[in-house]
Amino acid sequence: MEFAERLTALAAKVRQQRAQIETEEATKNAFVMPFISTILGYDVFNPLEVVPEFTADVGVKKGEKIDYAIMHGGTVQILVECKKSKESLKIEHASQLYRYFAVTNARIAILTNGEVYQFFTDLDAPNRMDAKPFLVLDLNDVDETLIPELIKLSKEVFDLDSIISAAGELKYIGAIKRAIASEFKAPENDWIKFWTSKVYDGPYTQKVREQFTGLVTKAAKQFLNDQVNERLKTALGSPNFPMANDPIIATTVTSAQAVEDDLMETGIETTLEELEGYHIVRAIVCGDVKPGRVVQRDAKSYFAVLLDDNNRKPIARLHFNRVQKYLGVFDENKTETRIPISSLEEIYDHADTLRMSVKSYLSAG
């Protein structure tokens, strides 16, 4: 199994089991040990590679233990401190890592709750662990750009010099990306004011701030959707703005019934998550039908993905307006089955069913 596939499998395990993991010890056994063994490639049962409850005398702190010390080349290279799953990681959790970092040969320290892994080194001062991580891996939302750096930490290709040399750039790029993501989700006043000043010449009053808070938030979501759309168009080899030369596509976009339905529906807010789900479904079935024939239509209780904008040809329904999300798929009798999903990636698990629905409509004419 390739590195990325192993990471995906562990992420799926975390999503499936996190509700049952209540203690730090359970977190170590269920999540952290598999990470050390399947992702980093070290034998957790070989004390020459992984030392649990590693002890070193640290000043007046005698016999203090760190959860795991990972050995490479006969010396300690990576220290791992664990907290229980579902507990947010805080800098005070890293106190033992700070002390051990100064008295061992380790240049890498990991603070984790089994779901989020924070990687530290000593960029700011030699042999003194930085206060901020240079890399953050969240198994609930894996950043694929980090995979090459994670591979460098694995036993097979352990490359400390390369890791350290890249750590400075990773540290600040990662921090900036997280800050941008935070602003997209819950924009602060400075962010709202900055973008308002780019497009509005009047005074920045309380009323203007309230008006532009919604506008900036909406524009940010639409921008992200446009970026996703662009990537899919590139991947599918589609032009940026396809011309409706196909009569079926032309009929779809001028359908009077579709326009009427859209006008009748009120109070509907299409979310970014629904649009991302739609793009995934369209990408799955585009091998069987032209992408332009796969149409979205939002309703109050669900988000529909249709063939030819026809309610009688449903490909999928996304029931995302609730805590538990469901993917609705259809059999040959157009009977819907709702499948609970915890992430958008799980839509790919039902690719065959989605393709069969499209093929059944095409064969029926």
Image: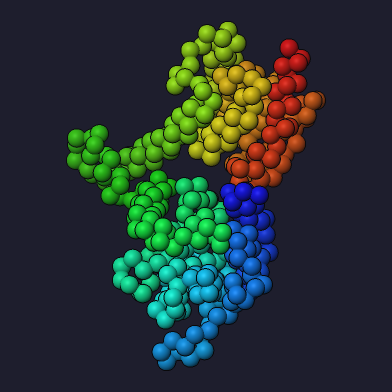
Q: Is residue 24 above or below residue 200?
A: below
**Residue furthest front in the image:** 73
Q: Nearer the viewer, residue 226 or 7?
A: 7
Q: Residue at x 66, y 56 (%)?
A: 13
Position of residue 223 relative to residue 256, above or below, is below
In-image side of 182 versus 30 (left or right)? left
Q: Is residue 311 left or right of residue 93?
A: right
Q: Return the x and y of residue 200 as percentages of the image width and height.
A: 23, 35
Q: State whether residue 164 is above or below residue 251.
A: below
Compare residues 344 and 152 and report the one nearer the observer: 152
Q: How is the image coloured?
A: rainbow
> Quick one: which residue is furthest to the right in this view?
333
Rendering quarter of residue 277:
top right
Query: Where residue 149 appears, x then y in whole percent?
Result: 47, 54
Q: Position of residue 4 (x, y in %)?
A: 58, 49
Report whether residue 306 is seen. no
Question: Which residue is painted at 19% across and 35% down in the image?
Answer: 201
**Quarter in which the C terminus is drawn:** top right
Q: Is residue 218 above or below residue 4?
A: above
The number of callouts visible is: 0
* Left or right: 166 as drawn, with respect to 260: left
Residue located at (40% from left, 35% from top): 223
Res. 316 in view: yes
Q: Nearer the viewer, residue 134 or 95?
A: 134
Q: Position of residue 142 (x, y in %)?
A: 53, 50
> Going 36% across and 68% down the picture, which residue do you hit?
122
Residue 291 position by quadrant: top right
